[in-house]
Amino acid sequence: MTNKLIKYLAIPLVIFGISNKIDAQDNKQDDLVLSGNINAGISSRNILISGKPEGESPIALFSGNLGFTKFNTSLNIFGGLNQDYKKTREIDLGLSYQKKFNEMAGKPSIKVNLERKVFPDIQKTMYLADLIVGMNTKIGDFNLQYRERFPSKDYLSGSTFVLNAKTPSLNLKKIASMDANINGTLTVAYQDKFVGNSSKFGYITPGVNFSLKKGKVNFDGFLKSQIRLRDDLKNYVYGGVKATYSFIKK
């Protein structure tokens, strides 16, 4: 476990250190910014990154994060809680470190997450690490996520690669004085002993997102259709809505 953690986190952390020095030379007046957000929503199903559903339908989803940003580098703590009408299904707590090399299109970002997931209903705990490389382009936003599940008394080790793509947003007419946008999404997952003991593609999920924004408040809706690529997963059509309040303080 320790060797894998060092292997997958050492390279991006070195990159962060070098790039921070470059940013510090070019952005000497950049201020330390405190930012965060709080999310509350409901989904007809909560489909996990494994491609399997969690809890009963529908399920309420609560999350938030708080952190600092300077020189395009951010350090955040985040947490979440998933609750259906019967019981609490999941409690999350984690730490993320992200570096955006440039806000312009075509420049990458690198993000590292360390996360602990507790599943109270089945009394199990999962430990995870993510390495996410993102890229904003004129044809859309893309990110490749590598997730490592560390071995514990409750779970065997496993990993998954998830490619997420999002089309450029289409601006719609204002609705109730709020900016309205719609965009398409696509997710493809390859699983290496993350589900079962085999290594194969897990699922492909096309979808559409709709958002309303005014000031610090966002309202988002989504509709997705998971298409299984392995026999031990299922096809699902699901959707949901959420509200987000964000803040920035210099």
Image (tube, grey):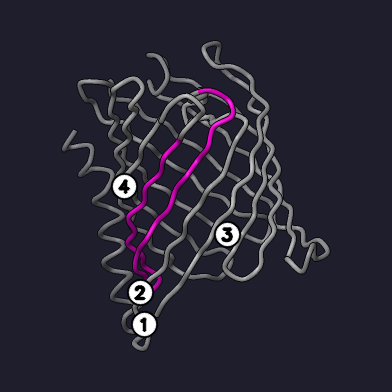
Return the residue found at the far bottom. 29
From the viewer's perspective, is residue 203 above or below residue 116?
A: above
Give the percent coordinates (x, y) of residue 125.
28, 28
Spatial CA distance of label 2 from label 4 is 20 Å
Q: Earlier in the sequence, mark 3 or mark 4?
A: 4
**Residue shown at 45% from the left, 59% from the top:** 109
Q: CA distance from mark 1 to mark 2?
A: 6 Å
Whether 61 is drawn above or below 233: the answer is below
| Mark 1 → mark 3, Cα distance in angstroms | 24 Å
User: Counting residues from the N terminus, which is met first, the one under dot 1 or under dot 3?
Assistant: 1
**C-alpha distance separating marks 1 and 4:** 25 Å
The residue wearing badge 1 is: 31
**What is the spatial separation of the Cα atoms under label 2 and label 3, in whole angstroms?**
20 Å
Amino acid of disc 1: Asp
Quick one: 205 or 122, which is closer to the camera?
Answer: 122
> Marks 4 and 3: in contact by CB < 8 Å?
no
Q: Is residue 189 magenta?
A: no
Tell me where the magenta segment starts and ends, as one range: 56-82
Q: Quadrant of residue 101?
A: bottom left
Q: Principal SS element in the magenta part?
A: strand
Q: CA distance from mark 3 to mark 4?
A: 25 Å
Please give the name of the residue rendered at 54% of the width and 29% of the height, measured from the top-left corner: 47
User: Pointer 2: what residue?
Assistant: 70
Considering every residue shown, the one lying at the far left of the view is: 2
Tag 1, which secondary structure? loop
Q: Which residue is mark 3?
A: 136
| Amino acid type, label 4 | Gly
State the image coordinates of residue 103 (x, y, percent, origin top left).
52, 70
Residue marked by disc 4: 94
Q: Secondary structure at mark 2?
A: strand
Q: Nearer the viewer, mark 1 or mark 3?
A: 1
The 10 Å Cα crowd at callout 3, few under 14, some 14 to 19, many 20 or more, is many
